[in-house]
């Protein structure tokens, strides 16, 4: 292997980026795979030469987003790892995740790699997380030598990830805290005049959500706002708009003309699962596409090498012209948790999926038989300054089915319809879907969130996928019962016989790790506390109704048993190094 460190990539505005190149010995030109991670190129090499680590092990570092460097070189590819501008050793100013400047710079790096003497003029891209999410945005710019991509993680709507259900989340605080920003500036600072910026920052300090988080408050109280510029932009852009559209794929897919393999884990939070599914299904995108759902995040390793076997087949076909049959197979591969096997499908949700309502009943029961219970359940929320945020200390109203008599597969979008009254002028609803196992352990499958004032639905809403009008808040009269339709993350899971489906209704989403609750990073800090939607700052009493007049229910995507020839033994392949 030949390794060239700190190669200069000169951009059109004179800024120079630093790149490391790993390529095979020999003189034969090879395809290049560009890795563009906000965490920089240096950390990507940390995983070389050691076994990937699983969630909870020491050094399980999610900033390692590009895996299998040695694997790719051994299979005849050059790997080009680049520090974005303003990151680590590269010049210039970093403007936050997925900025237009980052997208253009990455496209320039693709073309730089293509014109190296060792390159065959065909380029793909590598990576998950930020290195995966930027791939379709770069492809939409149509750099001439980018021939195929396989993003692991996509984000269709970055606003919805940072404001799930309209509520501010500090999810990006731990996730981005290890980005080696050397010179960074928020879009807000770059595009606002100084007086307008200071006024906006001062106004943000009145937000109870910002006041409840000392780190967010300090970020917005620092002048100039350079302590954590990405958080500055998240807080100052608190409604959908151009800032978020530039950093999301949903409006760019029509411009992608090269083959795209959309891959993701079935995350219980965030937009990565939505992003991959919607990119695969988008009717305005004419590029060849495939979809792969890789299972639950608790089973992933760092570096994330599980997809590399399939990715090798993808790039061998599109960058080397190998006829390996990958495009002759069904376009969808699903790792179905619970069953823990891979199945091929023609689309997602799978054909034959039908929605079925599972109703809330009294005494903490869930049943397909209909709503039941005259007395509403109550939940009392105490603000975080008065109440420990450890999960075991947080109140929750729980509902569960009886143990399953037979296996039941859910594959597709999930939503919940609640009927609730609160004694404040606004509140935050949190819904969590679990697989409760016979041994007492639980696996968290999906989350959903909604601010009470943003319950209004738009015309874009579909069964299982409500879309809320965040621009027109509705009045929340104290004690009045309203209907709340809350979208949850898509699932691909089999509840085995003997397991129970469990739902938690909460007002706070802090989640600590325990040996009976399996959740994923960044739910899990070294401190034991977690990131997520910031809790309400007022004492709030919730009442949940589930009678004939208020048929509260889950809308579940039921999938019939698949024929045996749809199941395979493929598990994602292995590729260490």
Image: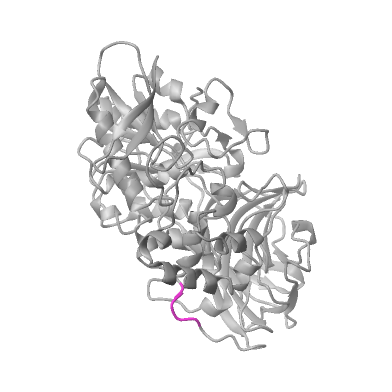
- Compared across the picture, whether 528 is left or right of 81 comes to right
The answer to whether one can see residue 111 in this image is yes
Residue 268 picture location, percent across and down: 57, 53
Residue 314 picture location, percent across and down: 34, 32
Quadrant of the rendering where the N terminus is positioned: top left
Question: In this picture, which residue range is highlighted in magenta?
Answer: 468-473
Residue 164 position (above or below residue 265): below
Q: Nearer the viewer, residue 139 or 92?
A: 92
Residue 6 position (above or below residue 261): above
- Compared across the picture, whether 410 is left or right of 87 comes to right
The residue located at (68%, 73%) in the rendering is 537
Please identify the quarter of the rendering in which residue 254 is found: bottom left
Asked whether 472 falls inside the magenta stretch, the response is: yes
Please identify the quarter of the rendering in which residue 21 is found: top left
How many numbered discs sit on the rendered protein? 0
The residue located at (47%, 51%) in the rendering is 273
Asked whether 477 falls inside the magenta stretch, the response is: no
The residue located at (37%, 30%) in the rendering is 19
Please identify the quarter of the rendering in which residue 364 is found: bottom right
Residue 529 position (above or below residue 430): above
Q: Main secondary structure of the magenta part?
A: loop
Q: Nearer the viewer, residue 420 or 220?
A: 220
Residue 151 picture location, percent across and down: 39, 42
Q: Nearer the viewer, residue 31 or 407?
A: 31
Residue 261 picture location, percent across and down: 35, 41
Residue 11 position (above or below residue 69): below
């Amino acid at each position: 292997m030949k390794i060239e460190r700190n190669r200069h990539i000169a951009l059109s505005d004179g800024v120079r980026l630093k790149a490391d190149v790993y390529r095979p010995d020999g003189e034969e030109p090879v395809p290049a795979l560009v890795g563009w991670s906000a965490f920089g190129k240096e950390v990507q090499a940390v995983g070389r030469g050691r076994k990937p680590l699983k969630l909870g092990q020491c050094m399980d570092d999610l900033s390692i987003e590009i895996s299998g460097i040695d694997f790719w070189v051994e299979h005849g590819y050059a790997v080009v790892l680049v520090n974005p501008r303003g990151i680590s050793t590269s010049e210039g100013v970093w403007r936050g995740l997925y900025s237009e400047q980052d997208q253009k710079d990455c496209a320039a790096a693709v073309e730089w790699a293509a014109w190296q003497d060792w390159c065959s003029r065909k380029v793909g891209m590598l990576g998950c997380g930020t290195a995966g999410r930027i791939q379709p945005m770069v492809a939409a710019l149509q750099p001439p030598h980018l021939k195929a991509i396989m993003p692991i993680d996509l984000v269709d709507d970055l606003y919805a990830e940072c404001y799930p259900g309209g509520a501010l989340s500090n999810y990006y605080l731990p996730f981005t805290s290890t980005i080696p920003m050397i010179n960074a500036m928020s879009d807000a600072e770059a595009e606002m005049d100084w007086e307008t910026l200071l006024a906006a920052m001062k106004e943000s300090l009145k937000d109870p959500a910002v006041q409840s988080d000392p780190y967010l408050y300090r970020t917005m109280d620092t002048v100039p706002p350079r302590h954590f510029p990405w958080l500055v932009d998240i807080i100052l852009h608190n409604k959908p708009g151009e800032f978020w559209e530039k950093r999301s794929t949903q409006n760019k897919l029509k411009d992608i003309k090269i083959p795209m393999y959309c891959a993701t884990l079935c995350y219980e939070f965030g937009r990565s699962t939505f992003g991959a599914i919607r990119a695969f299904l988008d009717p305005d995108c004419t590029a060849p596409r495939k979809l792969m759902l890789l299972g639950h995040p608790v089973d992933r390793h760092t570096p994330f090498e599980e997809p590399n076997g399939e990715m090798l087949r993808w790039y061998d076909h599109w960058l080397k012209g190998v006829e390996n049959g990958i495009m002759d197979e069904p376009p969808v591969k699903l790792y179905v948790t619970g069953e823990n096997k891979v199945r091929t499908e023609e689309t997602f949700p799978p054909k034959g999926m039908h929605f079925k309502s599972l109703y809330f009943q009294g005494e903490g029961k869930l049943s397909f038989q209909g709503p039941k219970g005259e007395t509403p359940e109550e939940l009392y929320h105490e603000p975080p300054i008065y109440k420990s945020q450890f999960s075991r200390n947080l109140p929750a109203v729980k509902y569960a089915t009886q143990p399953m008599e037979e296996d039941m597969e859910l594959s597709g979008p999930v939503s919940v319809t609640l009927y609730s009254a609160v004694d404040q002028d606004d509140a935050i609803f949190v819904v969590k879907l679990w697989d409760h196992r016979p041994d007492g352990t639980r696996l968290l499958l999906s989350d959903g969130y909604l601010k009470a004032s943003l319950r209004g639905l738009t015309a874009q809403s579909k069964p299982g996928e409500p879309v809320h009008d965040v621009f027109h808040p509705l009045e929340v009269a104290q004690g009045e019962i309203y209907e709340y339709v809350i979208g949850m993350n898509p699932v691909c899971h089999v509840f085995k016989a003997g397991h129970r489906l469990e739902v938690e209704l909460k007002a706070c989403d802090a989640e600590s790790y325990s040996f009976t609750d399996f959740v994923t990073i960044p739910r899990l800090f070294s401190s034991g506390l977690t990131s997520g939607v910031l809790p309400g700052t007022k004492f709030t009493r919730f009442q949940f109704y589930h009678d004939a007049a208020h048929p509260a229910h889950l809308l579940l995507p039921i999938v019939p048993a698949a024929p045996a020839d749809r199941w395979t033994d493929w598990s994602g392949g292995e590729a260490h190094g």
